[in-house]
Amino acid sequence: MPAELQGHHSDLNAYLTGEGIGFWETMQITRINDRINITLFRDDGTRAGSLDDGGLSDGQKNTAILALLFAHGTNPILIDQPEDELDSDFIYNQLVPLLRRVKHKRQIILATHNANIPVNGDCELLYALNTEMGKGILKAEGGLEKPHVKEAVLDIMEGSREAFRRRQEKYRF
């Protein structure tokens, strides 16, 4: 018997023989429910909430799941609209830096309507799509250094060059 367990010899013996047999038989046929709890912490270390206490918004739940998805592995990952339920501040300050770090370890394929993700996430290959009769039609492909790709991002994700210019004018400090 390992030295660490020698002090517990009589307790172990009782459970494994005689009086503990009923306990072990019960444990062998007891179904334990599968369950997971995720606790989300902010950058400053404070607790945002958990699944168990119902303290997480849908966006915070998405944040936790995205962090888990990116935490391990090197396999390609496909994500449809990671920006759903996430605010713009989180996308820019949390998700985009995470994508920039992870993209060197695994292939990431994203479908998004949020320009912050491909533009600030330093996307290497972008496919800009239009919809015609319910089908996606390729408008532009390539890197953001190509003028026609940049123009497609402005049109589709920013609403147009003019819409972007007007927002820029309104935000000037």
Image (cartoon, rainbow, N blue to C red):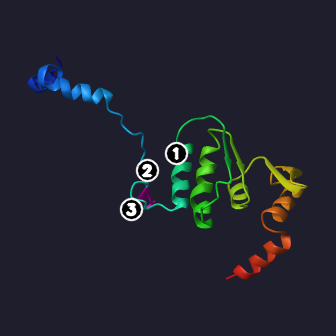
Q: Residues within 10 Å of mark 3 (few under 14, many from 20)?
A: few
First along the sequence among labels 2 and 3 = 2
**Residue shown at 63%/56% (left/top)?**
96
Rendering coords of residue 68 (x, y %): 52, 45
Residue 158 tag number? none
Mark 2 and mark 3: Cα distance apart in space:
14 Å
Q: Nearer the viewer, residue 30 or 103?
A: 30
Quarter holding the C terminus is bottom right
Q: Nearer the viewer, residue 91 or 78?
A: 78
User: Which mark, by number, is residue 68?
Assistant: 1
Pick whichever of labels 2 and 1 is earlier in the sequence: 2
* Label drawn at residue 46: 3
Query: Residue at image x 76%, y 80%?
Result: 169
Report, in whole angstroms, how far the alpha carbon at label 2 lies from the one at label 1. Answer: 10 Å
Identify the residue shown where x is 88% and y is 50%: 138
Q: Amino acid at mark 2?
A: Ile
Q: Which mark is residue 38?
A: 2
Q: Do labels 2 and 1 touch, CB within 8 Å? A: yes
Image vertical order of residue 135 relative to residue 170, above or below: above
Is 83 within the magenta? no
CA gap, disc 1 to disc 3? 19 Å
**Can you give x and y, in whole percent of width and height, for residue 101 in the image?**
60, 47
158 versus 77 height, above or below:
below
Q: Is residue 49 magenta?
A: yes
Residue at disc 1, secondary structure: helix
- Note whether residue 21 is visible: yes
Which secondary structure lies at badge 2?
loop
Query: Disc 1 residue type?
Result: Leu
Magenta region, residue range: 40-50
Name the amino acid, label 3.
Answer: Thr
From this view, report whether residue 170 is shown above or below residue 40. Answer: below
Which mark's residue is nearer the viewer, 2 or 3? Answer: 2
